[in-house]
Each structure stands twice: as structure tokens, then as C-alpha cells.
Amino acid sequence: MRYRRLGSSDLQVSEISLGSWLTFGVGVEADKARACLERAFEAGINFIDTANVYGRGAAESFLGEALAKRPRDSYVLATKLYFPMSDEDRGLSRAQVEKQLDESLRRLRTDYVDLYQCHRYDEETPLEETMEALTRAVASGKVRWLGFSEWPADKIRAAVDMAGVERFVSSQPQYSLLWREPEWEVIPICAANGISQIVWSPLGQGVLTGKYPPGAPPPPGTRATSEEMGGWIERLMRPDILEAVQRLKPLASEAGLTLGQFALAWVLREPNVASAIAGASRPEQIEENAAASGARVDPALFAEAERIVAVQP
């Protein structure tokens, strides 16, 4: 496993990180989830990403229990806030930052998180209020560094230009061969301001592993067959996209990688990407994903892959 510095922070994070959306505390049995977590550490993964809203606290509670016996400085822990936790609790107001942070720390059984992220931008709260609350969270010692997820470019600029507040060090956008929108504005702004990307869905919800053959029903037990986990995958299940993905297989083979590893290596070719977040329901998925770290791929193969999948989901 190789590691990259997270923006202007002092954090060194593994190129492949472990996500907990739709898995830990929700879609994967506890024993299997613990096995995935153990295999991640064995593979050198040190960065774990979660959020308060994942399972309405269930993912954080699982991680709090599973990590309880590990030295706190042996892993980098990130969580988020914004989405509703109840009818009254949502957003990035001063009161919510204070409340949701304390509740996340309680569930995670820790005194601090390494990275605290705004899960989306809150249009109903002044940016100044949010940044001041986050700055106080850092000053309190409960948070080491700050990040955001899926913020629009103009809001990123506004936060960067604000004086007297803690700086963001990470951005968490969706980014993959099938979704390149961050390249337009977000990555250039972040690269110029000490902010790294930690990207979600680098495998296109699993589509970029090639396990969904065009013209055939999704294999049993996959995300596309799950009512709980399949909602986000529908836009990527178009026949033209699935056919394009199949045409990537010879390129991955030429690179000596599985298709999933090839897709992860493509994401990591971007210098502003510090880590690619990949979830897992089985330990062997962890091993395969981790092996993408440090892969050397001929840029011509990546260029051809980009040409093949130049379709808009």
C-alpha cells in the first residue's frame, strides 16, 4: 500500500480507503464487516470513511465497537454531517455542528476525529456560521482537520477566501471513469488551495468491475439487485455503458490488472486524488482493491479507456 498526503494537513492516508456507506451496520452482517475491517488493516489501509447518516448512526456505532481495541493513532478516521438524523436535526448550523459532532464521537468511542466533513453544502445556513462552528470544533481538539463533500465550485472559493477560519484540506466528490465532472472546476480549485480529493464511487457502484453483462439480469446478490443498495446504480446500468465497460477488459488485462483495479488506478493517476474510497462486503474485495495501489499503467491505455467510455451517464 502506498500513502499520500491529504491536502495541506499532516495526515498520510492510504491510496485505497475503506468506506462504510450501505455496508457497515446496515447491509453487511457484523462478522463479515469485522472481517473486512481486519483485512483492510492487513492490506495497509489506514483510512476509514463514514458518516453520521449511514444507517442513522449504525455505521459509526459499528466502527466504534470494532476499533475500540486498536491504538487510536494507527488509523485515520473521517466522518460527516449534514443529512437528516431526525425531523429536527439536519444541516450545518452552529447548533448542529456541535450536537452532531458530539454524537458522532460518542458512537465512534473516540475523543476526536481526524477529518470532519460537511456532507453537502447547506443553503439554509450562512457559510460564515458554518465555518466559525467548524473552526471552534478544531480549536476544541475534537476535530483535527476539515473537509467537504460535493460542494459547488463557488462555495469552495468562498470558503477558501474567508479570513480567520480553519482551512479545508479535503474534498469528497463522486469521481470515476464514468463520472468526470470534478475535473471541470473542483479539482483545479482544490489543487491550487491545498485541498486533496478523497473520491467516492471510483468503481461506479461496481459497474466498473465488469460484473454486469449487458443484456443479462444482474447477478444474484449484487448491488443492482438490492432494494436498499441499488437505487444509485440505475443511471449506470444503461446498455451502452455496460457494453463500453466490457470493452475495457482487454486494456486492464494488458496492464496486468483486473478491471476493478484498472478503474481504481485510473482514479489514482490524478495527482490531486489522495485516496479512493471503496466499500466491501467480503474480505477478498478488500485485497483486490488494495492491490491497485501503486499500479503502473501505460498512459496510452488510460487514454483509450477514456475514449471508449466517453458516454454521459
Image: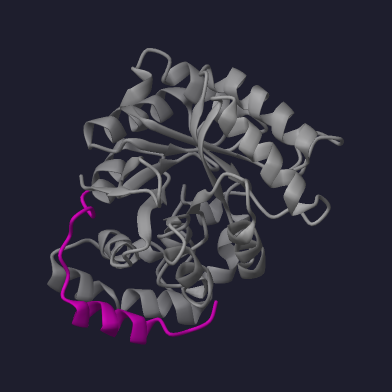
Q: Is residue 259 left or right of residue 89?
A: left
- Quarter of the image for residue 136 reads top right
Q: Position of residue 186 (x, y in %)?
A: 52, 68
Q: Nearer the viewer, residue 49 or 216?
A: 49
**Residue range corresponding to the magenta coloring:** 291-313
What's the residue at 69%, 41% (across, down)? 132
Q: Nearer the viewer, residue 263 or 167?
A: 167
What's the residue at 41%, 39% (across, down)? 281
What's the residue at 58%, 54% (across, down)? 149
Q: Position of residue 24 (x, y in %)?
A: 50, 33
Was residue 307 drawn as part of the magenta stretch in this picture?
yes
Q: Tell me, yes or no, if residue 89 can be seen here.
A: yes
Q: Is residue 24 left or right of residue 126?
A: left
Q: Quadrant of the N terminus?
A: top left
Relative to 189, does residue 17 appear above or below in the rendering? above
Q: Position of residue 272 (x, y in %)?
A: 37, 63
